[in-house]
Image (cartoon, rainbow, N blue to C red):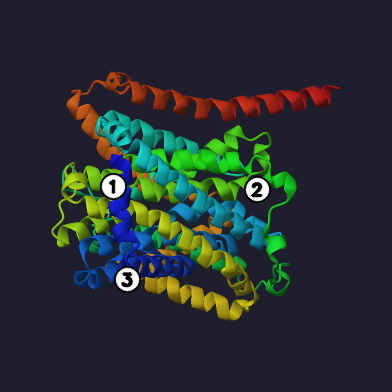
Amino acid sequence: MDILHNLALGADVAFSWQGLLFCFVGVLVGTFVGVLPGIGPLAAISLALPMTYYLSPPIALIMLAGIFYGAQYGGSIAAILLNLPGTASAAVTCIDGNQMTKQGRAGVALFTAAISSFSGGIVAIFMVLGFTPMIASFATDFGAVDYFSIMLLGLVAASTLSVGSPLKGMTMVMLGIALGMVGTDDTSGTERFTFGALALSDGISLVALAMGLFGVGEILANLGQEKRSPLKASGLTFKSMLPKRHEWHGLWKTILRGSGIGAFVGALPGSGPAIAAFMSYAAEKKLAKNPDNFGKGELRGVASPESANNAAVQAAFIPTLSLGIPGDAVMAVLLGAMILHGISPGPELVTSNPDMFWGLVVSFGVGNIMLLVLNLPLIRLWVRMLSIPYHVLYPAMLFFICIGVFSVRSSVFDIYTALFFGVIGYFLLRLRFPAAPLLLGFILGPMMEVHFRRALLLSRGDYMTFFNSVPSTVFLVLTALFLVLPLWSAFRKRTRRVADQGD
């Protein structure tokens, strides 16, 4: 009966005219900034923060949260149509989503992304309602060794995302970790690899890196080409958006697995939708009967990360609200918004501000329904973007990329950084090196280093401390499997090839 009473309390907030209005504004703005290359939820939430001063804390948080999870779907639109991830978590959607666009199946990819995002969000809401105390308790018990191990698992899994050689994927992960070390050391306070440049003292901007690799790099790779997608918006009907009958088979299992992984990973402090999307994609690829199809327009390669990142966004509020630990930079901004409104996130938040907590949970369901109703009819509009001439589209994309990169830290240096990594991204595309593992290595590398040093400090240099924790041991065993399985698969293929040549 307590859960029904709490939901009724939350419904009073979420279904008020203010709750519905600002939830709609949030998801609409979130989708819009997700579609626009180079903006993203972090900049949008930062710009919208002053507006919330005139709203009550629950309504303000509902709107800001709507921008966050609305941007996850909007980011997938740009990733699928233009190979530009509006958010870091949409980077993995580029792998198969953009290939489907090139094959003339952009409508199917967008429809699947919408359904997967909606399903992931709904599954996460039920998991939050049913397992919040257990998940929060489990996450609270995690130590430095556990965080290091799960991040190491994510990095090794990312190396298997490459369509080609896993060795190239691991190389890109290591490069991402190296780039993540640029800036001021959190422990000693000394500058590392800045080469005397003051602009690098805070590290390389994540937005500049992502937009350069995926945005500018893709533009440079396509300059001078006048190709067009065979899909025309005028001939795009609802039936043509639906996946084929054989593709429906097992797709719901993919969505459920992605939602489960996303909800679990998102509930862990220090995680986020990007990690959830990468891990879900890696797991789906390992479970697939034909893993070679991934990277070539596999529908499950769209459904898996999209269900995971939306589930992770909803579940990420668990550690933020109950523990006061933000999962990523966006959650840190939302945490700051609560503090500005006089709300203290922590274990007592649910009991001291039940209207805000449960109103936010109910608004997740309302917002996901709004996203589904809002975006499915607009798929033809998004696909129509493909008919824009490249000589008009590419300058506009560069403009938005520069505006988005500059707006995060108001730094012209970040614009030059994005252009520099755009050139790097161009050569990576030509050499067929995957850029997505580099991005994950850049995100996880600094956090992994902090937990690694903290674990060794607490254990006085004893490396066996990573095996003294059961979760850490499980994660390390899974990491070893991710390393061994590609080698075993390559060995079997080589043995089979030798046998065929012998015959």
Helix, strand, or loop for circle 1? helix
Q: Nearer the viewer, residue 283 or 364?
A: 364
Q: Amino acid at mark 3?
A: Ser
Residue 344 appears left or right of 170: left
Helix, strand, or loop for circle 2? loop
The earlier-in-sequence mark between 1 and 3 is 1
Label at residue 298: 2
Residue 448 appears left or right of 339: right
Please name the residue shown 32% across and 49% down the image. Answer: 7
Label at residue 6: 1
In the rendered image, which quarter is residue 429 located in?
Answer: bottom right
Q: Nearer the viewer, mark 1 or mark 3?
A: 1
As displayed, is residue 57 above or below residue 436? below
| Badge 1 density bin: few <14, some 14–19, many ≥20, Cα 10 Å | some
Q: Name the outermost residue toward the right.
A: 503
Image coords of residue 94 (percent x, y): 56, 55
Label at residue 126: none
Distance from Cα at disc 1 to Cα at disc 3: 39 Å
Task: Tell how many labels.
Answer: 3
Label at residue 407: 3
The earlier-in-sequence mark between 2 and 3 is 2
The earlier-in-sequence mark between 2 and 1 is 1
| Badge 2 density bin: few <14, some 14–19, many ≥20, Cα 10 Å | many
Image coords of residue 193 (percent x, y): 29, 51
In the rendered image, which quarter is residue 163 located in?
Answer: top right
Q: Nearer the viewer, residue 451 or 233?
A: 233
Q: Amino acid at mark 1?
A: Asn
